[in-house]
Image (cartoon, rainbow, N blue to C red):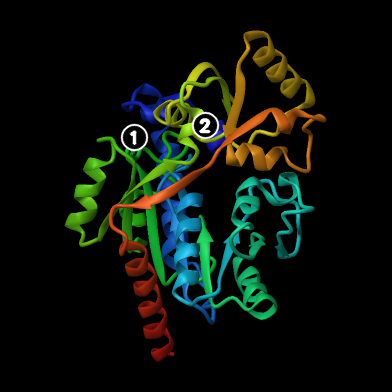
């Protein structure tokens, strides 16, 4: 997982990537075979998958939220499907943000639940039926699950981080790719390039030559005025913590101390106490990501800690305002065609 992703995955391929090539070849072959041949259950609703080619944070969840907001404006009733990183429910569970903790449902589902019903389950077909039958949803958005091959996807939008691209280009365990790029491109309907940078340019050119539409978007932090000139201790347990630190600085904050943690990290009380004491001693305010804050709510945060904590909220801004409607519209078109072909 991203929390265990070694740093060499994101550099030019070296001896470690090549030494692991036999295992990467095997992993890629199995993953590709599953994507091509696994039975995919067809759901009686359009299914839009927000996926990525690699492990690690590419910004899928903010994109899913932005598309759910636009779907509602188009008169649809979206619902989210998530596996829920670290989730503990055996049966499909609809997230209750007031009472569920990230230990039980995962951090991303808690963020998604503020915008639409979220079903958390490895059995995505059962989760989709729960959303349709019990919550009146008529448009399913999968946050991740592109490679799982559990349900039929009407439209797969693959999010690629412009700063990191495909890393060293090798398949797990030699690199961050979840399957061979060729196998994954076969099932991708469009690519969404997130942010600025050139690491994804070769992929973008290859996808364009394959006839895949290319969209672009950026993240925009909220609350710039409140951050301007503020001296901060910033901490984050996400796939690429340095992205968060850079975003805080781009928003005007002065990051004096940086504390990176593994992706989806659950903070122990002594870790939080140490962060608070360090910030207090250096006369710094604390700030973290919305995902980290979701993990702290209803969990291990000591009394008063959350009151001291700033949270950087971000929005996804598409290159042009009509892009979300185009993505949702093409998902609906694919679903209608699927129904006609029954």
Residue closest to the far top: 281
Q: Which mark is residue 234?
A: none
Viewer-proximal residue, 279 or 14? 279
Classify the position of the N terminus by image quarter: top right
Task: Determine if residue 147 is in view.
Answer: no
Classify the position of the C terminus by image quarter: bottom left
Identify the element where label 1 is drawn: loop
Residue at 39 percent of width and 90 percent of height: 340
What is the spatial separation of the Cα atoms under label 2 and label 1, in whole angstroms? 27 Å
Residue 304: x and y in percent read 78, 29
- Per the image, the residue denoted by label 2 is 226
Q: Quadrant of residue 134?
A: bottom right
Q: Say left or right for 126 vs 90.
A: left
Task: Determine if residue 322 is in view.
Answer: yes
Q: Is residue 224 above or below residue 115?
A: above
- Per the image, the residue denoted by label 1 is 163
Q: Say left or right for 169 vs 247.
A: left
Q: Is residue 20 above or below residue 217?
A: above
Identify the element where label 2 is drawn: helix
Mark 2 or mark 1, which has the lower sequence index? 1
Residue closest to the far front: 225
Residue at 67 percent of width and 75 percent of height: 135
């Amino acid at each position: 997982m991203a929390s265990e992703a070694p740093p060499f995955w994101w550099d030019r391929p070296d001896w470690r990537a090549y030494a692991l090539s036999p295992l990467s070849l095997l992993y890629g072959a199995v993953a590709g075979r599953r994507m091509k041949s696994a039975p995919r259950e067809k759901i009686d609703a359009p299914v839009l998958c927000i996926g990525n080619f690699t492990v690690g944070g590419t910004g899928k969840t903010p994109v899913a939220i932005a598309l759910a907001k636009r779907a509602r404006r188009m008169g649809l009733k979206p619902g989210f499907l998530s596996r829920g990183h670290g989730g503990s429910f055996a049966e499909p569970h609809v997230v209750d943000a007031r009472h569920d903790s990230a230990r039980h449902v995962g951090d991303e589902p808690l963020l998604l639940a503020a915008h639409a019903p979220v079903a958390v389950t490895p059995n995505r077909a059962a989760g989709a039926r729960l959303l349709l039958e019990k919550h009146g949803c008529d448009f399913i958005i999968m946050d991740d699950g592109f490679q799982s091959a559990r349900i039929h996807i009407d439209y797969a939008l693959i999010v690629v981080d412009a700063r990191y691209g495909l890393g060293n280009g090798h398949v797990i365990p030699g690199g961050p790719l979840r399957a061979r790029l060729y196998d994954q491109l076969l099932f991708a309907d469009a690519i969404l390039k997130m942010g600025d940078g050139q690491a994804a340019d070769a992929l973008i050119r290859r996808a364009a030559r394959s006839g895949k539409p290319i969209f672009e978007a950026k993240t925009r932090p909220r609350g710039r005025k409140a951050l301007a000139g503020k001296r901060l201790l910033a901490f984050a347990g996400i796939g690429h913590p340095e992205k968060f630190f850079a975003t805080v600085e781009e928003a005007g904050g002065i990051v004096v101390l940086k504390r990176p943690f593994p992706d989806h990290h659950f903070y122990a009380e002594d870790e939080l106490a140490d962060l608070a004491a360090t910030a207090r001693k250096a006369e710094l305010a604390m700030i973290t990501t919305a995902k980290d804050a979701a993990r702290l709510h209803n969990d291990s945060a000591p009394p008063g800690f959350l009151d001291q904590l700033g949270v950087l909220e971000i929005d996804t801004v598409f290159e042009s305002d009509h892009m979300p409607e185009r993505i949702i519209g093409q998902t609906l078109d694919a679903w209608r065609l699927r129904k006609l072909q029954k």
